[in-house]
Amino acid sequence: MKHAVAAIILGMLLTGCGARKKTTERPRDAVTVREVPPKPIEKTSAGSYIIPEDTGEFIRYDIASVEEYIETFAEIAQFEMKAYGIPASITLAQGIVESGFGRGELTRKTNNHFGIKCHTGWEGQFDHHDDDEIGECFRKYNHPMYSFRDHSIFLSSRSRYASLFNLRKDDYKGWARGLKAAGYATDKRYPQKLIDFIERYQLYKYDSADAVAHYPREIPRSVYEDKIHIVRQGDTLYSLSKRYFVSVDELMHLNKMNDSRLSIGQALRIKPDKIR
């Protein structure tokens, strides 16, 4: 399984998003909806970015076109390629297709840009949406950045997609066909849809080595807040996974856990030493 990245590193994905208009709305059980101005992106001394703290608010970017979607999320896709090996062109094309360039009904109510369903073991927020069947369960995120990271973890941690990571990073056609063959989508035209968007908008240019050369592969240890977390009352593996931007499976793997039970005072290893 690929190691997930600490929170302060995931924030690097936010480059370019500050210029977008954002709508902040409370979760669906509340009625308050308000506009918030773009906030400047805070940088670390290492040149990475810090993701805004998850306050529980639902933050949605108001995207007007495919071009604006690409402008908003291109650097996020590039960082994910650097960290996980998924071509940026594929991530962007999947986001465009699955989310309706950020304007689809499912994406607007869940920030789910990749149509990822709940699946067994999902402990996060969710919502129901009609897809292949009526009322299917889809993952829900408070911020679009969580969706992009979960997409990377989803593909890199499932054996059925393992063969894709043997392909060249510039083989977007192989990735598009491989995703369909592995069962990511039921649409027979899914590979061609991805390829069409990649070629129409020249998304392949984001896959080049030069395009991501400025992203550090090795992350200075100084950017980590800590290496060990002492379990406190109210902590769960899911709450810790959101706090430190690692998956529940990764936490269990790092700490050799057979189940999700925690004990107050338990010392948990939180993060890997480097990005793989």
Image (cartoon, rainbow, N blue to C red):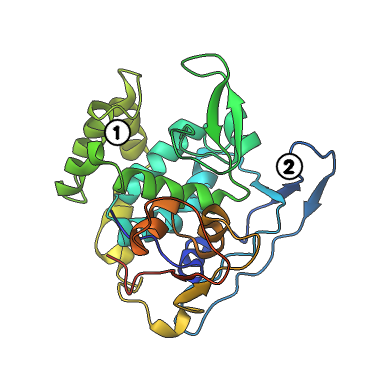
Element at label 2: loop
Give the CA separation, mark 2 to mark 1. 35 Å
Earlier-in-chain disc, 2 versus 1: 2
Q: Does the rendering let one see residue 253?
A: yes
Please give the residue where the numbered disc 1 appears in the rendered image.
195
Q: Tell me which residue sits at (84%, 38%) in the image.
A: 31
Q: Which label was assigned to residue 213?
A: none
Q: Nearer the viewer, residue 89 or 159?
A: 159
- At horizontal 52% and vertical 52% (from top left) the residue drawn is 146
Left or right of 193, for residue 119: right
2 vs 1, front mark: 2
267 left or right, relative to 104: left
- Which quarter of the rendering shows the C terminus? bottom left
Secondary structure beneath label 1: helix
Q: Does 172 sit left or right of 81 as displayed?
A: left
Task: Tell me which residue sits at (44%, 77%) in the image.
Answer: 227
Side of 128 where 225 appears, left or right: left
> Residue 236, percent across and down?
56, 56
Which numbered circle lies on residue 27? 2
Circles 2 and 1: CB atoms closer than 8 Å:
no
- Total marks in image: 2
- Mark 1: give few (<14), some (14-19) or many (20+) Cα within 10 Å: many
Q: Is residue 172 something one can see in this rendering?
A: no
Coordinates of residue 62 in the picture (x, y in percent): 65, 44
The amino acid at mark 1 is Ile
Residue 128 drawn at (x, y percent): 60, 26
Image quadrant of residue 110?
top right
Instruction: Please identify the residue farthest to the right as the structure is shown.
Output: 32
Q: Amino acid at mark 2?
A: Pro
- Residue 120: x and y in percent read 43, 34
Where 178 falls versus 90 (above or below)? above
